[in-house]
């Protein structure tokens, strides 16, 4: 965590010490490998910015509680649309550029489209990339 924050600071970004935390409501906390790892009821995200962060301006805390995605789930760490839209509306304005370095399900891309943000995403898993693109293509055709 600190290594990534240091790299972002070196690149000229401001990086708060406290990451954002998504509290997964209605989650069972199960692990995909219970013999080796505990289940996670939270997920953290590092955020960085240039200029004045909206979080400080709005006086918002760093905890975001939203239910997990149960239907149309295409990635194990997929965030719900309600969480993505809250984050986008807290940290950016229409027309801003959003970078998602773990774009797996492409849900942030879809949120950016809804919230009128520009978007760049990266995903190293070809399987998740293909699933995200296929789902997003169908989503775009239906909406």
Image (tube, rainbow, N blue to C red):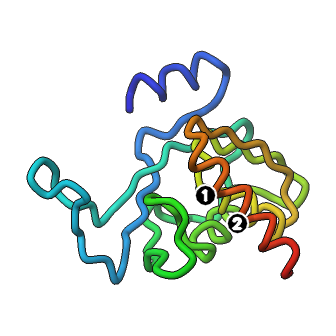
- At a point 83% along the width and 64% down the height, the residue shown is 113
- At a point 66% along the width and 57% down the height, the residue shown is 132
Check disc 1 and report the residue beneath it.
105
Residue sitting nearer the eye, 81 or 14: 81
- Seen as rendered, the residue at the extreme left is 35
Mark on residue 135? Answer: 2
Please count the marks in the image. Answer: 2
Cα distance in 3D space between marks 2 and 1: 8 Å
**Mark 2, secondary structure of its residue:** helix
Q: Position of residue 143 (x, y in %)?
A: 86, 81
Residue sitting nearer the eye, 123 or 19: 123
Q: Position of residue 77 (x, y in %)?
A: 45, 58
* Mark 2 and mark 1 residues within 8 Å of each other at the beta carbon: yes
Mark 2 or mark 1, earlier in chain: 1
Is 79 on the left or on the right of 49, as rendered? left
Q: In this view, does 103 lie above or below 15?
A: below
Q: How crowded is mark 2: few (under 14 residues within 10 Å), some or many (20 or more)?
A: some
């Amino acid at each position: 965590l600190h290594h990534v924050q240091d790299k972002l600071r070196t690149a000229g970004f401001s990086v708060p010490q406290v990451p954002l935390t998504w509290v997964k409501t209605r989650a069972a906390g199960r692990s995909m490998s219970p013999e080796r790892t505990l289940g996670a009821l939270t997920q953290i995200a590092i955020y960085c910015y240039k200029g004045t962060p909206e979080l400080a301006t709005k006086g918002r805390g760093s905890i975001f509680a939203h239910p997990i995605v149960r239907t149309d789930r295409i990635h194990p760490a997929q965030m719900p649309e309600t969480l993505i839209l809250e984050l986008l509306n807290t940290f950016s304005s229409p027309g801003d550029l959003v970078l998602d370095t773990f774009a797996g399900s492409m849900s942030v891309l879809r949120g950016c489209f809804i919230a009128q943000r520009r978007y760049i995403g990266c995903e190293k898993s070809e399987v998740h990339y293909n699933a995200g693109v296929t789902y997003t293509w169908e989503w775009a055709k239906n909406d």
